[in-house]
Amino acid sequence: MGVNISAGGRRSGSGRRRVHGSGLNADINVTPLVDVMLVLLIVFMVAAPLLAVGVPIDLPKTDAKALPSQNEPLTITVDAEGLVYLQEEVVPMEELVAKLVAVADAGYDERIVLRGDENSDYGSVMQVMARINAAGFSNLNLSTDPISQ
């Protein structure tokens, strides 16, 4: 908000200063804009970790490096009880290959990440891996968490 006061103004009969050439102040007040942007930044910072894959599992810890990726891979998860998830949807073992073929955008070259819970049965993870491989998908990666030091 601004005020334009001239130094040598004369009083007219009405008691008001007469200022020639004064108009509306066209300055933009950016304080509300900055406030809104900071609130949005905080909201997105809080919400970003929640956008990860929604099946909570404890991945095994290794010191393997992450693979470079250009696009988001398909994720298959085997939890501690042996349930199989395609992305975030529970899929029966018999329907896994059919649903995987239906979802794969790039066909059999689609990158697939297999996530197995640390406490899951090794055999169930290997059954899922064997079904994926038998279906013709060859770009299969296993997911782990880094070792915290």
Image: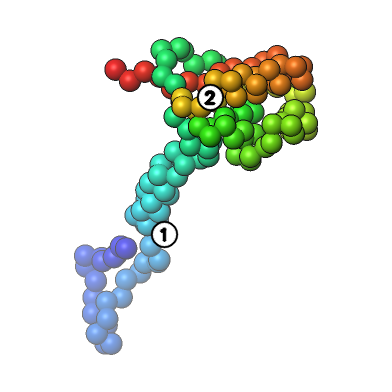
- Horizontal and vertical percent position of residue 47: 45, 44
**Residue at label 2?**
121
| Residue reaching furthest to the top | 64
Residue 112 appears at what percent x and percent y? 64, 23
Q: Position of residue 115 (x, y in %)?
A: 55, 25
Decide which of tag 1 and tag 2 comes sooner along the chain: 1
Q: Residues within 10 Å of mark 1 (few under 14, many from 20)?
A: few
Quadrant where the C terminus sits is top left
Task: Please rate how many residues cluster around mark 2, counting C-alpha atoms within 10 Å: few if below 14, some from 14 to 19, many from 20.
Answer: some
- Tell which of 6 and 63 is nearer to you: 63
Q: Compared to 106, does 52 lie above or below? A: below
Q: Give the Cα separation between the discs numbered 1 and 2.
A: 69 Å
- Is 25 left or right of 78, judged from the image as shown? left
Going by the numbered disc 1, the residue's amino acid type is: Ala
Residue 102 percent location from the top left of the image? 78, 33
Tell which tag, 1 or 2, sits nearer the viewer: 2
- The residue sitting at the left extreme is 7
Out of 120 and 33, give the one closest to the viewer: 120
Q: Residue at 69% of width from left, 36% of height from top?
A: 92
Name the residue: 44% across, 21% down: 60
Do the CB atoms of the residues marked 1 and 2 lie less than 8 Å apart?
no
In the picture, measured across the screen, residue 95 lies left or right of residue 119, that is: right
Vertical arrangement, residue 69 with respect to residue 4, above or below: above
- Camera-nearest residue between 45 and 50: 50
The residue that disc 1 covers is 26
Q: Between residues 39 and 9, which one lies in front from this camera angle?
A: 39
Asked whether residue 37 is in view, the answer is no
Under circle 2, the secondary element is: loop
For residue 110, above or below residue 18: above
Q: Is residue 32 visible?
A: yes
Please determine whether, in this image, residue 21 is positioned above or below residue 138: below
Residue type (three-letter) at the residue carrying disc 2: Asp
